[in-house]
Amino acid sequence: FGVKDLTVAPAGERKPGEGHHHVIVDGRPVPRGEFVPFDDRHLHFGKGQTETTLKLSPGRHRLTLQFADGTHASYGP
């Protein structure tokens, strides 16, 4: 994962310009300011991870990379 002009940090505190990645599987981006849901479609990387391996069912999938602050509030699409 990558991000420009923001800093990757673990979830927890809300600090301007910091946050962590989420991968949305077969869903839409979360609008700015809304919280990224905790469900099977929204994968949270709140430890500040910058890479992963996904195991998905066979077939086509839409993956969306979403960056959110320490409280999981989206920075926008």
Image (cartoon, grey):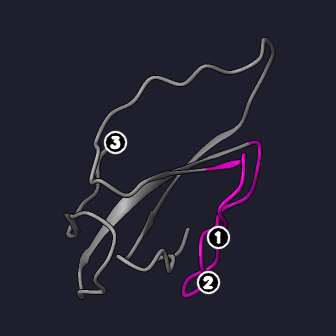
Left or right of 8 on screen, residue 46 = right
How far, Cα to Cα, is label 1 from label 3? 17 Å
Quick check: marks 2 and 1 in contact, CB under 8 Å?
A: yes
Q: Residues within 10 Å of mark 1 (few under 14, many from 20)?
A: many
Determine the CA span between mark 2 and mark 1. Answer: 6 Å
Residue at the right extreme, as displayed: 59
What element does badge 1 sit on?
A: loop
Residue 34 shows which numbered tag?
A: 2
- Picture coordinates of residue 76, whole percent (x, y): 52, 75
Q: Is residue 36 magenta?
A: yes
How many discs mark residues in the rendered view?
Answer: 3
Q: Residue at x 74, y 29 (%)?
A: 61
Q: Which residue is mark 1?
A: 30
Q: Position of residue 53 (x, y in %)?
A: 45, 23
Labels 3 and 2: the sequence-earlier one: 3
Mark 2: give few (<14), some (14-19) or many (20+) Cα within 10 Å: few
Sort mark 3 into few (<14), some (14-19) or many (20+) by Cα contacts within 10 Å. some
- The magenta region covers 26-42
Q: Position of residue 33 (x, y in %)?
A: 55, 88
Of the 4 image quadrants, the one containing the N terminus is top left
In the rendered view, does 68 fall on the left or right side of 48? Answer: right
**Residue 24 in the image: above or below residue 75:** above
Q: Disc 3 marks which residue? A: 1
At a point 29% along the width and 45% down the height, the residue shown is 49
Where residue 27 appears, x then y in whole percent?
76, 51
The amino acid type found where label 2 is placed reads: Glu
Whether 60 is drawn above or below 4: the answer is above
Q: Are marks 1 and 3 in contact (CB under 8 Å)?
A: no
Q: Amino acid at mark 1?
A: Val
Residue 9 included in the magenta stretch of the image: no
Upstream in sequence: badge 1 or badge 3: 3
